[in-house]
Image (spheres, helix red, strand yellow):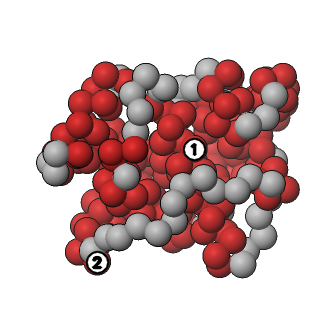
């Protein structure tokens, strides 16, 4: 999906068309799920937060400002929602995330039917996403900060500068963590 296509989908959503949401959902589900699951570390919680992400996107579509790059925008929302979930459930928040406060409004409305519909559709896509157990185990050996950068760089196709902006850390730190993670993955047999 291009920035232009994402903006067109958002315009459809603002006008009340669910077609825009469906297009974004189909294209971005694996990306959002990978970001969320990298933070919450629990498949069921990741599925819940991912479903809630698309509901929030629907309810806040009018807030999107074109021209800033949609991948960084949705990555920031997904990341903040995952961190909020950890806070709400009282689970430990990795040190790299604890200083960041959510910037999204957490008071949003949605119907149970919408949640169920999104969750049911998510199951088949998410099954495809987590198909390689060996790769998952290798990624689990990375530090949370390294895994998050790998997800944003590879799954999100973000630049180091965009990752720096999303995570609100210096670009040098991003490139160092990325290089360190890649070296570890190579030791586990992945290129």
Q: Quadrant of the N terminus?
A: top left
Quarter occupied by residue 23 = top left
Mark 2: give few (<14), some (14-19) or many (20+) Cα within 10 Å. Answer: few
Q: In this view, does 123 lie to the left or right of 114?
A: right
Q: Is residue 7 left or right of residue 29?
A: left
Check the image and report above or below for 68 versus 62: above
Q: Where is residue 190 in the image (x, y as percent from the top left)?
A: 69, 31
Q: Position of residue 113 (x, y in %)?
A: 23, 74
Check the image and report above or below for 54 versus 160: below
Check the image and report above or below for 54 versus 167: below
What is the secondary structure assignment of the residue under circle 1? helix
Mark 1: give few (<14), some (14-19) or many (20+) Cα within 10 Å. Answer: many
For image coordinates 41% across by 33% down, the residue present is 65
Residue 112: which numbered mark, if any? 2
Q: Cα distance, mark 1 to mark 2? A: 25 Å
Q: Which of 113 and 129 is in front in this view?
A: 113
For image coordinates 67% across by 21% down, the residue present is 161
Q: Where is residue 57 in the image (x, y as percent from the top left)?
A: 37, 51
Q: In this view, does 52 lie to the left or right of 104?
A: left
Q: How many marks?
A: 2
Can you see residue 183?
no
What is the secondary structure assignment of the residue under circle 2? helix
Q: Which of 97 and 15 is in front in this view?
A: 15
Q: Mark 1 points at which residue?
A: 76
For image coordinates 56% across by 59% down, the residue present is 81
């Amino acid at each position: 999906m291009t920035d232009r296509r994402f903006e067109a989908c958002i315009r459809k959503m603002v006008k009340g068309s669910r077609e825009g949401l469906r297009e974004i959902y189909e294209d971005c589900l694996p990306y959002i799920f990978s970001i969320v699951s990298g933070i919450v570390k629990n498949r069921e919680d990741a599925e819940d937060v991912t479903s809630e992400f698309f509901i929030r996107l629907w309810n806040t579509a009018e807030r999107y400002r074109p021209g800033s790059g949609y991948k960084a925008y949705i990555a920031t929302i997904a990341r903040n929602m995952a961190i909020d979930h950890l806070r709400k459930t009282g689970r430990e928040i990795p040190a790299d995330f604890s200083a960041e406060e959510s910037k999204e409004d957490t008071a949003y409305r949605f119907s149970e039917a919408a949640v169920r519909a999104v969750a049911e559709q998510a199951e088949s896509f998410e099954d495809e996403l987590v198909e390689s157990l060996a790769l998952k185990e290798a990624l689990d050996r990375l530090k949370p900060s390294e895994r998050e950068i790998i997800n944003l760089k590879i799954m999100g196709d973000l630049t180091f500068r965009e990752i720096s902006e999303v995570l609100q850390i210096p670009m040098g730190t991003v490139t160092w963590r990325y290089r360190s993670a890649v070296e570890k993955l190579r030791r586990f047999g992945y290129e």
